[in-house]
Image (cartoon, rainbow, N blue to C red):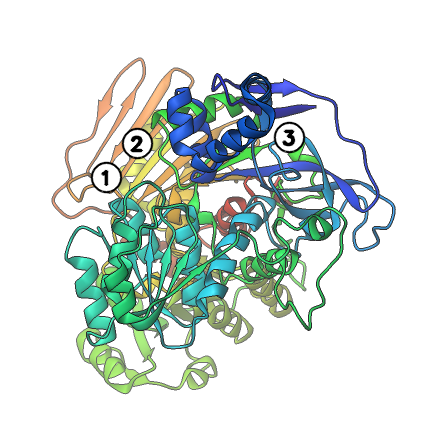
Amino acid sequence: MKQVVQNYKSGELALLDVPAPGCKPGGVLVRSAFSLISTGTELMKVSEAGMSMVGKARSRPDQVAKVMQSVATNGVPATYRKVMGKLDSYTPLGYSLCGVVEQVGDGIDDVAVGDLVACAGNEHALHAEVNWVPRNLYTPVPDGLAPRHAAFGTVGSIAMQGVRQGEPQLGEVALVIGLGLIGQLVVQLLVASGVRVVGADPDPARCALAERLGAAACGDPASAAVEAAVAELTGGHGVDQVYLAAGGGSNQPVELAAHLSRDRGRVVDIGKCSLDLPWNAYYEKELDVRFSRSYGPGRYDPSYELEGRDYPIGYVRWTERRNLACFLDLAARGSVDVEPLISHIADFDAAVETYQSLKDGDLKAVAVLFRYPDHKEAEGETVAPAVTVPAVRLSGGASAPARVTKSPVRLAFVGAGNYATSMLLPHLTGRDGVELSTVVTTTALSAANAKRKFGFAEATTDLDAVLGDKSIDAVFVVTRHSSHADLTKKALHAGKAVFVEKPLALGEDELADVLKAVEESGNDRLQVGFNRRFSPLLREAKKRFGARTGPASVRYLVNAGRLQHGSWYLRQGSEGTRFAGEGGHFIDTVSWLLDADPISVYALATPGNDDLQVVLRYPDGSTATISYVTSGPASLPKETLDLVADGKALRLDDFVRASVYGSKRWVSSRLPKARDKGQEAELAAFVRAVRTGGPMPVPLTSLAVTTAATLAVQTGLAGGAPVTLAGAE
């Protein structure tokens, strides 16, 4: 097997072929799926190994003291041979991983072969393809937690033990100094404990990340911002706890801790930083200085770690193993989110190059994971499960329109927010053959405003009255995303044609329920607001491009931009992710251009999932990459698209200009200021289908696959692998 090792004398890093460990009693053999590089502790070791002998001695005075004791006992020559022999040896790296149990030793009855486990220990959870792990240093991974997230178990336990030492209480205020990997986890654990958190770190990116993960405010410790935030949150009294999660030789962290603590506050040292305590400052406030020993009680105790002797829970509530299990449980339940901390995932074969990039500063990272060659065998965890596209069936076996109407078509709107009033209703007001019958909103005033502005015959807050009105032909669902699926089901069962603004659903269960409503009601008169395929400019460009014989490559850049503070789009807990809300637009556009539905989805994201790369694969081998970014400048066009196939290319520039390159070149004239993204043509097609009883503008199967593909993006991000759209082919 292969293992990452380092020669502490020369600093050499290597990926060595070494014998696999045997399975001893009292433990299990674990084949690694993902292991985590601790960018603090491990890089410190790597950096120390590259120092001169004098530098090594200065960095480890504790080891120098041992050497001097050995000289006094054994003499210089013997001590020299012993020290140089130890330095000139390979030592392992790593201490946090997730993998699959490959063999169970005697005396183990809490896991079985094939179980997914998280492992800890700098002698047992190494960057190696296989490790032997004793009983108290592994714990089963909860259902639903991705292996790459479970690989954070050890560092999560370190952060958790530090927080336990601080004894946080609801309503307190804490200061976290150092927002690296451990500091970011400490922030989340404190927030989950009901504590308001201020962070301090000189890196603006890490400050921004901590604020996204729940910190009230963060800033450079050398600036006045941190002190101002503490004063505001504590009324000038100072923080209740300080967590030192910083490294390095500066004494600034302990000085800042004293300055910003309240009287009798608690200072917890988690990281390895200078601790030259300013006596007067700590004495006058009577500060309680505490140390956090790694993963928790049991650490450095051979009888606990190697012999498996547990501490009675009545005397020691939180041990190493219990901390590890607790952190995984929090991650599985979403109380702690480690995904935004993952800066890079490297193949294990590239381990040496990855360490070198981190050491040289070419790779800026909070957390880096190694992915092992056999990780796909890890009990179905590293390959994201397939997203099943529910079969589209009708109880009557054929399309059953709500009814064929005569002019005018009577429409009801459920919701009258910004999109409805700016992008839909203006195209319907005064349109021949259309009557705006009723508008339904949750507040009476908004309904009255819509009635007055757009000429609805009635305004109400009673949805049931609208669904029971047999004179209404079609219902528009233009509410917040979380209500779309439920309202669509109700309208389908009421026999109405339904136009639901994207998204159709926020989860696989919701999508299945909508399609079940189609089957039960026999009513497939459904349209989702995927308007871009109706854009006159894009339709003309597709016509000019002509028929396609070979597979195509598509690149679609969406410069989504930042959302304003307070936007309801940010309420991911209730309204879904931003991409789940609008990503279907772009997937549908690509599928329409390729005249096919996708069969698999692969997604990658920057920390915080702010910028996404979504790769779609189609039955004929075509591929499409959708770059959905929020970090671009406002001056950059929102949407640009390129399709290349058969020696031809189609380019769309933000629905203002389109070009086709081939034997001849075609370039559209520049459109007026207002971009036509197809809403008017889409509404006309929907009204026509309702009036005539003809096919809906987009096949129901395509709507279902596009929705499933959009939802698969989040599944793929969680699992770190392509997601197959089962049933889409």
Q: Nearer the viewer, mark 3 or mark 2?
A: 3
- Going from N to C along the chain, the mark reached first, 3 or 1, is 3
Quarter of the picture containing the C terminus is top right
Type of amino acid under label 1? Asp
Q: CA distance from mark 2 to mark 1?
A: 13 Å
Q: Which label was assigned to residue 247?
A: none
Q: Is residue 687 above or below residue 141?
A: below
- Going from N to C along the chain, the mark reached first, 2 or 1, is 2
Type of amino acid under label 2? Ala
Mark 3 residue crowding within 10 angstroms, few (<14) / some (14–19) / many (20+): many
| Quarter of the view holding residue 80 | top right
Q: Which residue is mark 1?
A: 654
Q: Nearer the viewer, residue 521 or 239?
A: 239
Type of amino acid under label 3? Ala
- Percent position of residue 110, x then y: 80, 55
Q: Which residue is mark 3?
A: 128
| Tag count | 3
Find out whether the residues at labels 2 and 1 contact each other: C-beta distance under 8 Å: no
Q: Residue furthest left?
A: 673
Q: Secondary structure at mark 3?
A: loop
Q: Which residue is mark 2?
A: 541
- Percent position of residue 625, x then y: 42, 33
Mark 2 residue crowding within 10 angstroms, few (<14) / some (14–19) / many (20+): many
Quarter of the picture containing the N terminus is top right
Horizontal relation, residue 108 to residue 147: left or right: right
